[in-house]
Image: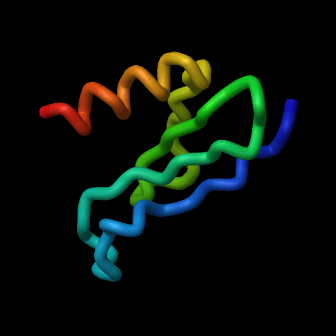
Amino acid sequence: MTEFVFVKSSYSGGDAGQQCVEVARNDPGAVAVRDSKDVNGSILRLTPTTWTAFTAHVGAV
């Protein structure tokens, strides 16, 4: 399994207490999402197709 390389959202501020997610898209078979405040916590793994559908839905709201 590829080690995920997480990137924080460009919409995230620099304050440590802010709510933010980090996304890793360096593995062609998965998109990983985690809480930026809990980097050792759970990782949500999605298929690229599911991630695309999710971001399209969020962008439409």
Residue 20 location, x and y as percent?
33, 57
Which residue does the image show at 34% across and 81% down from the upper left? 14
Residue located farthest toward the bottom when viewing the structure as drawn: 14
> Which quarter of the rendered picture does the N terminus lie within?
top right
Residue 16 location, x and y as percent?
33, 75
Left or right of 33 on screen, residue 18? left
Colour scheme shown: rainbow
Residue 25 location, x and y as percent?
65, 43
Query: Could you say which is closer to the camera, residue 23 or residue 42?
Result: 23
Which residue does the image show at 85% across and 38% down from the upper left? 2
Residue located farthest toward the right when viewing the structure as drawn: 1
Which residue does the image show at 29% across and 76% down from the upper left? 13
Q: Is residue 22 above or below residue 14?
A: above
Which residue does the image show at 51% across and 43% down from the upper left? 41
Q: Is residue 34 above or below residue 14?
A: above
> Which quarter of the rendered picture does the C terminus lie within?
top left
